[in-house]
């Protein structure tokens, strides 16, 4: 891993994604997390202070960038529930855990960067227990044609500078193509930040089966 990806990018991501109006979105989403939780694309641990400590039994995280994990150390040390890392088979993007293990899976500002979002969501479905919940906030392709044109124009440079970040992925369509049952879903522009990166998809999707709550 190069200097930029391992040291510069984690600093940029940490600063860009800890702004108060983004933290508000994290708080609102993560209050629904409970039980055994998996977070994909853990980054620098910005979600950690927002998990409800009395509801979360333990947290497993997936983060392939060691530089992100280095910046997360102090946040990991500050929480009251155990945090562990799990592996990812880089060739086929398979999570190295058994089926139906987690009550909650969390993804925030991650699906824009994974190599194959459909594969990632198939893995999310696999590792959720029946009745388990997939909580996500992601940015992606906007319905405004003018914004979408700029997203298409800038997505190439965003992938280079943003660690693979695609500005123009239709996250909502991709997520709804998987066999989850939406419990809540919304799409909206944030009222702050550049519009090319501010169209959000937010959802609480359930794996069908017995409710484990």
Image (cartoon, rainbow, N blue to C red):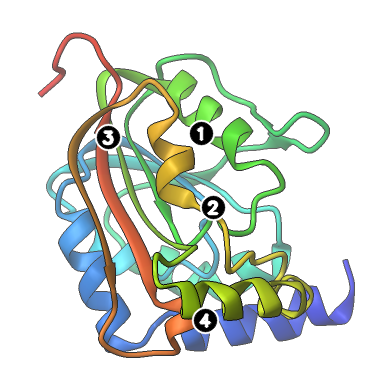
Q: Position of residue 108 (x, y in %)?
A: 41, 58
Q: Nearer the viewer, mark 4 or mark 2?
A: 2
Quarter the N terminus occupies: bottom right
Q: Which structural element holds mark 1?
A: helix
Pointer 2: what residue? 111
Determine the CA span between mark 3 and mark 4.
Answer: 27 Å
Q: Which structural element holds mark 2?
A: loop
Pointer 3: what residue? 205
Name which of mark 3 and mark 4 comes first in the sequence.
Answer: 4
Name which of mark 2 and mark 3 comes first in the sequence.
Answer: 2
Q: In this image, 53 relative to 167: left or right?
A: left
Pointer 4: what residue? 14
Name which of mark 1 and mark 2 comes first in the sequence.
Answer: 2
Q: Quadrant of residue 117?
A: top right
Q: Residue at x 16, y 63 (%)?
A: 28
| 103 to 164, vertically: above or below | above
Quarter the C terminus occupies: top left
Q: Residue at x 69, y 78 (%)?
A: 153
Name which of mark 1 and mark 3 comes first in the sequence.
Answer: 1
Q: In this image, 1 relative to 63: left or right?
A: right
Q: In this image, 75 relative to 8: left or right?
A: left
Determine the CA span between mark 4 and mark 1.
Answer: 24 Å
Determine the CA span between mark 2 and mark 3.
Answer: 15 Å
Name which of mark 4 and mark 2 comes first in the sequence.
Answer: 4
Determine the CA span between mark 4 and mark 2.
Answer: 17 Å
Pointer 1: what residue? 121
Determine the CA span between mark 1 and mark 2.
Answer: 9 Å
Q: Nearer the viewer, residue 152 or 138?
A: 152
């Amino acid at each position: 891993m190069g200097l930029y990806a391992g040291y510069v990018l984690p600093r940029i991501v940490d600063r860009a994604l800890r702004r108060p109006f983004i933290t508000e979105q994290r708080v609102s989403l993560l209050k629904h997390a409970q039980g055994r939780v998996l977070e994909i694309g853990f980054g620098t641990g910005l979600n950690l202070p927002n998990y409800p400590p009395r509801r979360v039994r333990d947290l497993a995280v997936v983060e392939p960038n060691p530089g992100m994990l280095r910046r997360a150390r102090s946040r990991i040390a500050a929480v009251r529930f155990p945090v562990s890392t799990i592996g990812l088979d880089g060739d086929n993007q398979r999570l190295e855990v058994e089926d139906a293990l987690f009550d909650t899976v969390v993804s925030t500002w991650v699906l824009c960067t994974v190599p194959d979002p459909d594969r990632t969501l198939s893995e999310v479905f696999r590792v959720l227990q029946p009745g388990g919940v997939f909580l996500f906030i992601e940015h992606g392709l906007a319905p405004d044609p003018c914004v979408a044109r700029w997203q298409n124009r800038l997505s190439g440079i965003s992938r280079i500078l943003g660690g693979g970040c695609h500005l123009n992925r239709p996250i909502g369509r991709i997520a709804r193509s998987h066999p989850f049952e939406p419990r809540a879903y919304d799409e909206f522009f944030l009222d702050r930040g550049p519009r090319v990166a501010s169209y959000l998809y937010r959802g609480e999707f359930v794996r069908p089966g017995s409710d484990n709550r």
